[in-house]
Amino acid sequence: MQRANVANGPRLGSDVRPEAPRIQDVETLGGRGSLELLALVESQRTRTPVRVSSSRELTASLLNRLDALGIIRNDGAALINTTSVEGLAWSYSWTIPWRSLRSQLIEFLTTQGRDPSFANGWLRIWRELFMGEAEACLRHQLQISQLERVYFASSASALMADVQRYSLGQWRYACWAAVRTMKNMAAQHPGNHELLKLILETELPYRLEMALKSRRIEFCFGSYDSLPDCALAKSFSHVATALGDKFWKEVPTLEHVGGKATLPT
């Protein structure tokens, strides 16, 4: 299976998608589609692998959506023409030439994509990215501390449900601090996974509140303090929106992405 050629892009599939929607240009592809396609393009631009999204599962979902739009094939049927990203096979099948694709996507996202009419959609995506990045950070901290067996998706999802109080940077700090406490307790009580789960359940909220009340920068971690930002997060925070470091410093709100009204509850 081939990786994309950095200079020329992935090889085209054997045909376009006659069964797919007729999306003629980037504008018709829309905000989310353009953002996700740009993330895929950006992940292929360097010889050093870059994560498309915060997890392989989310990348697979992204590829599925682009496949449904007829932009790529991700069934792995034509192996000779496929490209691999995070172990997932896909081939480019849209009519827009790969060489001009990145510039067209960036042009659309930095002009029309900055219009206030896109704000509600960008806020929803920011919250989705928040959840994925926070969960990936927790998984990463547990893995490097050799505590991955303690990870439990249902409890973690419940703990991460409130994205309207804390920033992503505060979550990153809380995950790091909570796992550090767990690691210390694991040394004292080896094999006691129930105790470690209890510590995680109590430490995460405690550290989050500490970060929220103090608002000090040392309690707000950027990407350089944890996992590097994925291509999707970078494309969102630096191209589709003008968030920049606000992506991890601020709580996701409509105002930060150019909106003026609040979303209905």
Image (cartoon, rainbow, N blue to C red):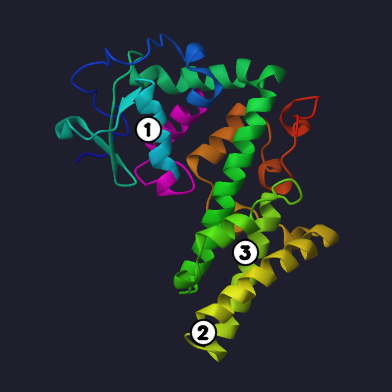
Q: Which residue is mark 2?
A: 192
Q: CA distance from mark 1 to mark 2?
A: 40 Å
| Number of residues whose C-alpha sits closer than 10 Å to that of mark 2, classed few (under 14), some (14–19) or many (20 or more) | few
Range of residues picked out in magenta: 34-57
Where does the image place residue 232, in percent across and percent down from the top left? 51, 38
Total number of numbered discs in the rendering: 3
Q: CA distance from mark 3 to mark 1?
A: 30 Å
Residue 201 appears in the figure: yes
Look at 84% across and 62% down and name the residue there. Answer: 214
Secondary structure, mark 2, is loop
Look at 67% across and 66% down and name the residue there. Answer: 204
Is 214 on the left-hand or right-hand side of 24?
A: right
The first of marks 1 and 2 along the sequence is 1
Q: Which residue is mark 1?
A: 64
Nearer to me, 264 or 216: 264
The first of marks 3 and 2 along the sequence is 3
Residue 51 appears in the figure: no
Nearer to me, 159 or 225: 159
